[in-house]
Amino acid sequence: MIAFRRTRKVHAHVNPGRSRSHSGRPRAAGGPRSESRVGRACHLACVLLVLIAVPRAADAQIGIVGGYNRDMLHGVDVAEGFSLEEDPNGFHLGIFLNVNLGLLAIRPAIIYHRIVDVDVRSPTDALDFDLEIVEVPLDFRLRLPVPVVRPYLLAGPVFMFPSSPDEAIDSLLETGPSRIDVGLGFEWSFGFRLWPEVRYGFGITRFMQTDFPLAGTPFSAEGDARLDGLMVRVGISF
């Protein structure tokens, strides 16, 4: 659950009221903006994978990764009587290409990242929605020379392409927000390679606007909503 500091009231633009689903909260179908974001993400990911490709003789592995994420919309001050919360139990799945270059390594990836049940409330209305993100991280790893456990440190940019099944929410999302991830992991070899890892992402650009389409009282908040996140994941490569 995300908790935000409550401060003074600042009025934001409000979209007109919308029809509600059987749960009483507004929902809508996705639009072409979501498709265009996914298309740009796939093109960027393909370019990164081609640029990082190395000869077959190099120490390179292709793998799959998945795990748990706890996301936080950081940088928004919500006024008295309003709330912005979410179910912290999200997940992510993806593929990666790792290239070892001695003590250094480069690891681009394509990740599907899901944030579920973001809940927005005013004194008179409520809205819940899901978020989907296609992420293209480019990790730079420092492989520490410790035998057996084989730890590494990582850091690198993550390019995000968010969308939402709710068209009104989708229109509030930025076209290409980004963050910086740092983390610690291990590279274990058992005939295949196992990559347990924990990482934290710091949002560095605005992720979405906060003009949420609530009926009645306008949603009151100020600041740029940036997406931070804690991720615990495990990868397998061959």
Image (cartoon, grey):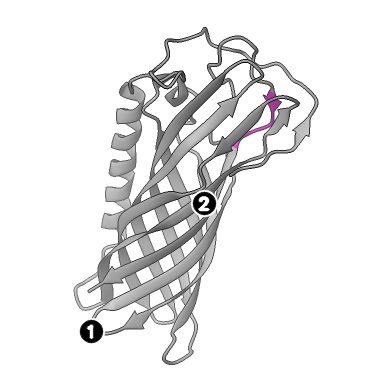
Please name the residue shown 37% across and 72% down the image: 195
Is residue 182 depicted above or below 178 in this figure? below
Q: Residue furthest right?
A: 8
| Placement of the C terminus among the 4 image quadrants | bottom left
Residue 167, disc: none
Q: Residue furthest bottom?
A: 147
> Which amino acid, mark 1?
Gly
Is residue 131 depicted above or below 138 in this figure? above
Is residue 6 depicted above or below 30 in this figure? below
Tag 2 residue = 70
Alpha-carbon span between mark 2 and mark 1:
32 Å
- In x, y percent, where is residue 106? 39, 67
* Label 1: which secondary element: loop
- In x, y percent, where is residue 225? 61, 35
Local crowd size for mark 1, using a 10 Å CA cut-off: few (<14), some (14–19), many (≥20): few
Q: Nearer the viewer, residue 124 or 18?
A: 124
Q: Is residue 22 left or right of residue 193?
A: right
Tag 1 residue = 191
- In x, y percent, where is residue 60? 27, 73
Q: Does 129 appear in magenta?
A: no
Q: Is residue 194 left or right of residue 7?
A: left
Is residue 209 in view from this perspective?
Answer: no
Provide the residue span drawn in magenta.
221-225
- In x, y percent, where is residue 233? 41, 63
Please name the residue shown 46% across and 20% down the image: 25
Question: Which quadrant holds residue 196?
Answer: bottom left
Please name the residue shown 74% across and 20% down the image: 10
> Which amino acid, mark 2?
Arg
